[in-house]
Image (cartoon, rainbow, N blue to C red):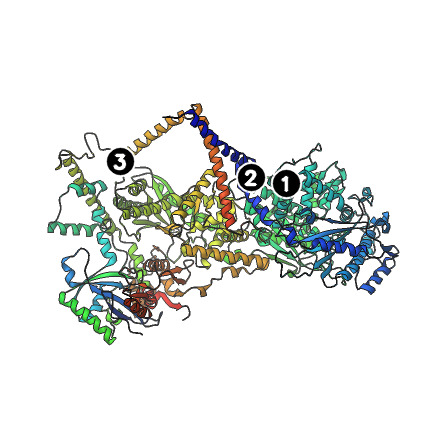
Amino acid sequence: MPSAPPTIGDFSILPVSIPPLPSFPRNAVHYLYVRRNAPKMPTAADARSLFVTNVPVDSTEAHLRALFASLVGAGRFESAAFEDERKYAHSQSQSPIDAAQPAHAARLLKAHGKKRKREDEEAERAREEAAARLPSIWTRPLRRSGSTAVVLLADEKSVEQVLKAIGKANKTKKYPTWGGDNLPGGRAPPLGSLWLKSHNRLSFPDKKTLQASVDAFSALFARREQEAAEIAKRLRNEPDEDGFVTVTRGGRAAPASRNEAEEARRKMVEKQEKKKEELTNFYRFQLRERKKEEQAELLKRFDDDRKKLAAMRVKRGKFVPEA
Amino acid sequence: MDSAPAKRRKLDHTQDGADAALESAASTGISRSRAFVLEADELLDSVRLDYAVALDGADDLLHRIKGAVEGIKARDPLPVADAAAKLEKKHKITVPFPDPRPRENSNYKVAFAKPAQFNVVGSYVSKTMIKSQKRHAVDMLIVLPEEILQEKDYLDLRYFYKRAYYLAVVASALRKEFGSEAHLSFENLNGNPLCPVLNIQPKGPKEDNKALLDYRIRIIPCAPDGFFPKTKLHLGATLVRKGGDVATNAAVVEPTPFYNSTLVAESSFLPYLKVLKQAEKRCAAFKNACILGRIWLQQRGFGGDVAQGGFGHFEWAVLLALLLQGGESKGHAALSASLSATQLFKALVQFLSVTNFAEKPCVFGPGDAHLEAHLESGPVLYDSARQLNIAFKMGLWSASSLHQHAKWTRSLLANSTADQFNPTFIMKTDVLSHSFDLVARLNHPDGAAKGASSDFQGQTWNLGSKVYRVLNRALRDKEMGERARLIHIQIPASPSWSLADKPKTTGKAPLEIGILFDPANMSRTVDRGPSAGASAEEKEECEKFRRFWGDKAELRRFEGDAIRETLLWTSTTSFDLCEEILRYILGLHLRVGHLHDEIIVYGNSLPALLSLKPADTALFNAAKKALGTFERDIRALDDLPLRVRQIAPVCPELRLASVKPPVLGPSRSAPQPFECVISFEASGKWPESLAAIQRTKIAFLLMIGSLLEASKPGEIKALVGLEDARFETENLAFLDVLYESGPAFRLRIHSDLEEVLLERQVKDKTAEQYLRQRATTMLATFRRLYTNLPLHNQYISTCATRFPALAPTIRLVKHWFNAHKLSYHFTDEFIELAVLNVFLSPYPWDAPSSPSTGFTRTLLFLAHWDWRSEPLIVDTGGDMPAADQASIATRLEAWRKIDPNMNHTVLFAATVQEPSGVAWTTHDGQAKPSKVVATRMTALAKSASRLIREAGVELNCKRLFVPALAEYDVLIHLNSKVAKSALKTYASIDPADEADAATESVGRSKFKNLDERTGQDPLPLARHPADLLLAQLSAAYDGPLVFFRGSADDNTIGAIWNPQIQRRAFRINLPASYKPAVAGQKRAKDEAEDGEQDELVEVNREAILAEIARIGGDLVEKIDVKGA
């Protein structure tokens, strides 16, 4: 194994040796690239976290915990956030609680709603979210090959120590091992056929659990809808800072559903078209023009054919009968 | 506005140029055939020979021949035997006497004198040779002088003996003249054993001149025009009276139409030359029409040779000329001389498609009543003016085959939306395994056809003729319903032989029989013959029937008290039935086929490969029936809040298109539910939020499930399963309904509001780009599942009833995709459409009537399909307007312009119901298959088609299904045992415990009744575990590896490293696992000196494979790496 450089860019390279398996009996080395976490939008925990890229596809928090324990000893590792999880955290539609928001309510809330920042509300929100979430169907997810993770350590000192340990590992060529005996048993659910079987089992959750989560969601959704309606009602008479009153649904008349509006529009368009139809071929000039158009069309198609033929000629062999 | 009239006039003026163009557009034909005309013109240009270059030196050669022949000294008459012996002794040339040879003691004399006339005829003079012809020949006529002939010579082959002697003398002179410059040999003119001709093949230095054709010159001796009294040569005359041996004595009174027609033809070369010259002069497009005809015939395997059907370029040209001269009932010309070449071609095809020479004599000029009688001996196409039956070289089979081909081509030319040009002129359609459902090879023993006829077509021809008659009667009985649409007899071609040898005959080369099924009738196992009544007529009918069918005929009583002669066959499939009948009837009438190797039958090995059985249809029908029960059960639920509108099947099992027939009835393995979609009446109750709709659906499914369970307690089990969804707005759940009796269904709910909301999101310009993109993908998925798939199911089912061969063909083709590990990249629906296309636009044939022809033609289609520029348009209803087709083509063009590298759209398969063309070829916004895979499919189909053509009927079909495993970089072998066990999961047992139980001790499972699993039914599979593994792997490695896999039980996954993902500069978001490049590091250092910091990394293949091994765990048995 030729020695790899200790750094690449501003990343330290952390080689991890992979134990052989009966199905692939070779010693492989996987390379993780580690640096201090410096996201575009800094957070409080940046100083004690590390940014790791090229994590193995089967990474779990347990794996990383074991890895860091073998580097700097136990107790330094706090948690890990993987790329896909972080992405989901941002994507609004993944959280059932946000998804429960009726579309128009979301818009209204964004514009006029109160900011909910109070801690007990946060906790409440988390609880509701947990209740409405559907049961997970995988015992553990796979990461995309070459993806990243952010590892949160105990303190800033640990970060230093980890980076130092990586340098040392590179020098002594004593690479930490991935998984295997290193991993306390039972921390990570197994892969392979058991993983697939559990998935199948989890895909058919208990009816009660399912019903409960659906009910929780419905309750949430109904409440949100009501809240939105209330806001809308309030806004109906409330001018904003520029003095404008937002026009919202549900005026004096019963609220028109969007479907009905679309239906009405379609009818109107139909009516217009019918009127238009009655007037075609009414005047002579229309007839004349239509004829002219037809001729132009014929010419155009003739031209198209010729062009197509030229294209076929370019692709040789098209005009030779098969032998 | 200053729209001055002057300006307007000017505008009008510019229109003039356009008018001229319009005129030209109109003059080339009406709009729909425009392209065809242009393409045909192009074809004519590209096949035309440059005579000056290609046949350089032919004229000189002809002059030399003429000089040499004129220089031959006249020879005095000698008795025929003496003359032949002399010639053989002196020149070592065997006189090519036709069979039977003149007897030693016969006393007529042969002589030689200077030829009366030399003439060059045929396509060399009319300049209608083409490049792609098989053998180019320049025909030179030598007219025998009248002084060496006698009028009586038309009798008893005497003319032919004299002609043969004459030819031998000419050959001896020419051999002296040319020496080693040319190769001389004899052959039969058009395979006619009566007329040997001399072949001169110049051995020129061809290497230096590539444009020079490999042509030959044929010396054809013939009789002077009008020498023999034609009135005596009519078709009914018996001109060979002296039977030489006992065997022919019996045939003394039989007429010899072939012999007679050959004699007439011998003296009609010049009159026909005149006819053709006249036609050329009168009709400018005549030559081009002849060239088109030559190509059309050649692509269908027709030629002037007896073995090729006896209808070639000459016959085509003469027929066309006659139609230009007359042909109408009142003697007017049937065709106008001012027609264009394509119009003439179409007219003649039309003529051939309505005229069957084998059924009704086609006569030009005043008819002759006795012609009708000659249909017994062969087809009749009679030219009264020259008193020749032009079709004398044709067999009954070739006449009906020509008729059939013309019919197919006409239906193609009438279809304005299909590609008319390629099937008409480019595709080769004489490959037996493409054309016929059953091919039999008859190894005939000696004397099988002895004494069959006293005419002179040759033994094999006679046998073929007899076989055809028997089969035609057996398989194409109109009363019982025609089992076969076409019966083809392929006679071996007659070879050429060297001057010193005796004339070669085709000998014992086997006869090939091709049969095209009528699928509706061929599968009939009981034939109902004439009814056995009391009247004399009926009795005679029955007698005839029994005489033909022998012991097989028996009397049976049918419903309505009809007693009929009946045939009972024991086989079950169309193919086996045909084989049974063939063997029986040929054995009965020709006494061949009792030995097994006398008749070898080909064409069934493909269906046998998959063991397609007629019983499968019953299973498919049972599945459909079960669906009916299921639908009734759901509709019977009273407490549903919405009324059910429809329950539509969406899986291949319910449209007769799955490789394996559906499994019904109780089984111990996990149930495999049939997928269905349920839709309800329109309702305003759906919430206006996608996520809420999905949750509502779950609630709905839970409700349907518990209602069903309550309505039929004990019989039905319902389980709600969760989809592997990434977003809350996707479909989240399905309901599996398991019947105790076996069948299982998977139900998904269709909500129309969902589509409206998605559409709104797609159109919402204020939303972020990635959200709109996601909505687009989700909308496509939605439409595929709830709109397109139910429709697809419907028309595939309909077509499967319409074409009995469709369903088995689809299954075979899917099997092929499976075998080559392509199916992972292709949707079932796309494959079905490709097959359906072969049935709906089958040109140049008719729709396939058996799975094997369907399969071979589908491969042919896939090999020829240029998907880069052509959409696949399947006109499922048969009534798609041309404008729609044009707009689909335009859409493809637009796609190619947007995405020239074909990253998002590769294959384009549209139907009337799904004009977007990408529903079945994209998945989650990705092309499925990608360009690489589509190219691989084309390459595989091409090599398979080549193999089919080259190996012919003897092909071992297994070779088409052998995967090329060596081509993959990585092979992942799955452990079949573990894969099998992964199929079963139980609701109450944690798989981990189960595994522990299996490994730790046998204690728990020692007693069957204590095992928790006993009595429990396994859960249905949300998805096949191996599929699931592959899906997870592809999601994790969508950059570096492309995976290939066949069906669900395929335990070997192939993978190829993506060549586009290689060594690259390091950055944060890498597309795969990379390792620092060691060799590259040095280079990077060099570059660093140049001031460019570029640190390279390369794909860490070993680590990736190790990861795969970890993910697969016990499921992966072994990972093989190419070259390791």
For label 2, the residue is B414
State whether residue B236 is above or below residue A266. Answer: below
Label 1 or label 2, whichever comes before in sequence order: 1
Determine the secondary structure under disc 2: helix
Q: Nearer the viewer, residue B1012 or B251?
A: B251
Give the residue type at disc 1.
Answer: Ala
Residue B996: where, in percent of width, then height?
29, 67
State whether residue A220 is above or below residue B1030. Answer: above
Determine the secondary structure under disc 3: helix
For label 1, the residue is B285
For label 3, the residue is A258
> Quadrant location of residue A243?
top left
**Residue located farthest toward the bottom when viewing the structure as drawn:** A172
Q: Chain of mark 3?
A: A
Residue B164: where, in percent of width, then height?
80, 55
In the visual, does A78 lie left or right of B513?
left
Looking at the rendered structure, whether the residues under marks 2 and 3 are on a common chain is answered as: no
